[in-house]
Amino acid sequence: MTDMTETGAGSEVVPLVAGPTVELPGSWSALALLKNLFSRTVRASNHVPRHVGFIMDGNRRYARKRALEVKDGHEAGFHSMSRILELCYEAGVQVATVYAFSIENFKRSPDEVASLMDLARRRIRQITENGELTDKYGIKVQAIGALELLDADVLADIHAATERTKNNTRATLNICFPYTGREEIVHAMQGSVADHVSGSEISEETLDSHLYTAGQPPLDLLIRTSGVSRLSDFMIWQAARSGVDIELLDCLWPEFGPLRMAWVLLKFAFRNSYGAGASLADDDDE
Amino acid sequence: MTMTESQPVNTKFTVSDSDSSATASGSAYHVPPPATSRLNGGTANTKTRSIQAIANTVLTDNRAGKLADGSDSASNKSQVSYVGYTFYKTLLAVMFFFYGMFRYCQLQYNRCKLKIFDILNSPSNTPQLIRQDVVKLAKIPSRLAAILEMKPVGDVGGGLHGLLNDASEVVCWTISAGVKHLTLYDHDGAMQRNIDQFRNEVYEHLSMYYGPDNVPNYAVKIPHYNQVFYNRKDSPVPTDKHTKVAIEVSILSNRDGRQTIVDLTRTMAELCSAGDLEVGDITVDLVDSELKQLVGPEPDLLLYFGPALDLQGFPPWHIRLTEFFWEEDNNQVTYSVFIRGLKQYAGCKVNVGK
């Protein structure tokens, strides 16, 4: 995406949030160089997922495990997310979709809902206002989901925050807030039905074009952390398609760093280089 | 409700019809069904083909521009120096080489593991043993689903017969485990088309498990055609409504997935233009109740007998909270996958809303 000579020269990547694990001066630029090298190499395979979905599960458990406050767990999760997104966009992923708030979350206690809302709101502002990530990779940040369920002031806030990046075209970050996959399907059905009244045939593409992710490349890779093997109502329409790679990882989200993401990308590239997803498991079967 | 009554008329296609319409309306990103790619020449020469594929990626770049839909990467490519390009390709080859070595070890390790599991869990066609395994579990799913694949005809356990054999085995295990509802899915609908053979095959397997005089009653449903069958092909239809069936098997195919949701949308659109329904009336609850009637309820556990999870167009509405289970690098329908899936399910807790 970025011109090679340009980024080759100034490949210093500034972390979005100062990491708690900086040990040596200069270790960041070394890591950035490595990341740059890896991204270009993976990109050379021409098998980078175009659209990646993330279910970022395990922030609270991480906090409990480390005896941190829940707030700090979420903070660590956010830090992890920004570093992973950076690697993804660097490697050529066009769209990333993250699950920030489920409609089901409204069932929780009002206090918790309020704090989750507040958190998601601050996150969106943090990403867009900081600007380093969004400017460097030309990311358009948008909130998708049943936005009408949000309070007016939250909505206005999000609108203001995403406005800043609306002219970016190279990549997209979808923040699902508040979202469920079933609601998305129903939303697409409503849109298709409304269009039909003006006289048109309904097909799978019609529904596709009324999804929240309309016009974006199809989902290639879906990652869920914390060892739970369920989709929890995230992108069910997209993930059920054949050929979508679903990775269920047995680590908590804040532990899922760029290194593991790199491994997943390598795995994806390797698998897809074998054409038609032919698996190694097939040879010398007895 | 009027909607469901008009639905069967709307969805009455023959199998071949729906197939062709699906291909015709295939999106720009159409992924061919797994069976077609799998049936292309079997597995005999995979190693050679793998090497060719790698060589192609590394040496000739026949996929240029595919990555970023042309524009970006194409302009990039022209600017990137040949040296840089070769450098990254070489690095990629090295990386793939090491990953490939790792992958090979992993594959062997997984194979060994699966073999050991197979030895540890062998049902030897006895319902009592399966029952014993299941009784220990804290909970069992009330609805089970399995995705099956037709393997190339040349392979062991391949072709239609292999598929039906696998399906009947799963039915027997499910009955023995005491689960009352089973959903079997295959992408191309081969089981739906050969439903009579399927029923007979299930009967044969059940008589192996339970003895020929003791075969439990079973019902086989094809929700898409709104058909229900009882027991094997020539068995009399039970006139008594109270005849208890030990299991209810629903046979689904790709047609029951997104296409059924599209059909439902069409029906709703017609109702809307006739003024019988408002767009605002289309809610998650309404769609859920309609799809429950058209396809069936959501399964609790979905077993996949392939090497890496691929949902292959399984009905998307029905995988909301479904637990998935598959064994990495496994390629066979074995009892150990089944029982380990049930064990995983017994140990999991579901919390809605994370």
Image: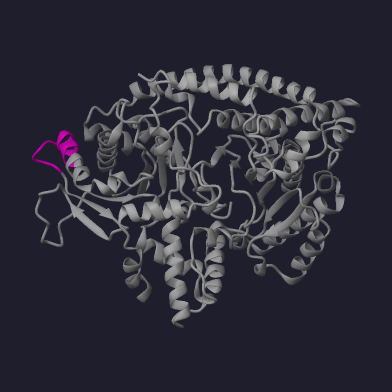
Residue A212 is covered by the magenta coloring: no
- Furthest toward the bottom, the residue is B275
Q: Main SS type for the magenta part?
A: helix
Q: Position of residue A210 (x, y in %)?
A: 58, 63
Give the camera-side residue of A207 and B52: B52
Image check: A60 left or right of B146?
right
Q: Residue B221: horizontal and vertical position, in percent?
A: 26, 54
| Along the line of sight, the residue nearer the viewer: B282 or B156 | B156
Residue B281 located left or right of residue B142: right
The answer to which image quadrant residue A249 occupies is top right
Viewer-nearest residue: B336 or A20: B336
Indicate the quadrant containing the N terminus of chain B: top left, top right, bottom left or bottom right. Answer: bottom left
Residue at 75 percent of width and 34 percent of height: B77
Give, as a single range, the part of the protein colored magenta: B203-215
Residue B21 placement (x, y as % from top left): 41, 56
Q: Report x, y in % for residue B124.
A: 24, 27
Residue B297 can be seen, yes or no:
yes
Going 20% across and 52% down the picture, which residue do you hit?
Answer: B245
Is residue A232 among the parts visible in the rendering? Answer: no
- Tell me: residue B283, above or below residue B175: below
